[in-house]
Amino acid sequence: MANHLARISRPLALTTLATAGLFMSLGTAPSAGAVTGSPAPECVEYFQSWRYTDVHNGCGDTVAVTVEYTNGQWAPCRVIAPGGWATFSGYGTNGNYVTALRTCDPA
């Protein structure tokens, strides 16, 4: 794999990455479901790392959930069958931790 950042100056690379992060934080991603605001059932648990947040449905019913982050980052609405798993973005190097799981409407 080629490292194209090694060919450009460090300040230019940092400016480019910061600009990309700004556009991502502006919420340019389309909404995939409406958050209802109610907390997910207690039988739905999450396990987070810096790269991924894995969500497990330990309930007897199918649930539709999304992840709420400290910086308000957009997250998709995912339908998880009983005993199933879904993967969301992790907290990354900027410390964007999960604050809650919320129910959502996948429509």
Image: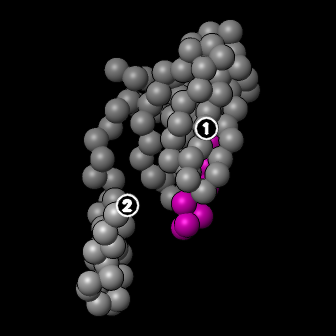
Q: Position of residue 95 (x, y in %)?
A: 59, 64
Could one spot residue 43 in this view of the protein?
Answer: yes
Identify the magenta region.
Answer: 92-100
Q: Position of residue 87 (x, y in %)?
A: 53, 36
- Quick one: quadrant of the C terminus? top left
Q: Report the amino acid beneath label 1.
A: Asp
The disc, 1 or 2, on the residue closer to the chain's N-terminal end is 2
Q: Nearer the viewer, mark 1 or mark 2?
A: 1
Query: Crowding near pointer 1: few (<14 within 10 Å), some, many (20+)?
Result: some
Question: Which residue is tagged 1?
Answer: 54
Q: Position of residue 5 (x, y in %)?
A: 31, 78
Quarter occupied by residue 10 = bottom left
Question: Which residue is tagged 2?
Answer: 25
In front here: 98 or 15?
Answer: 15
- Residue projecting furthest to the front: 1
Residue at x-position 49% and y-position 21%: 79
Query: Crowding near pointer 2: few (<14 within 10 Å), some, many (20+)?
Result: some
Image-based side of 93 in relation to 77, left or right: right
Image-based side of 15 in relation to 48, left or right: left
Q: Main secondary structure of the magenta part?
A: loop
- Quick one: quadrant of the N terminus? bottom left
Q: Report the amino acid beneath label 2.
A: Ser
Say above or below: 8 vs 85.
below
Residue at x-position 28% and y-position 74%: 4
Image-based side of 87 in relation to 46, left or right: left
Q: Position of residue 46 (x, y in %)?
A: 67, 37
Q: CA distance from mark 1 to mark 2?
A: 22 Å
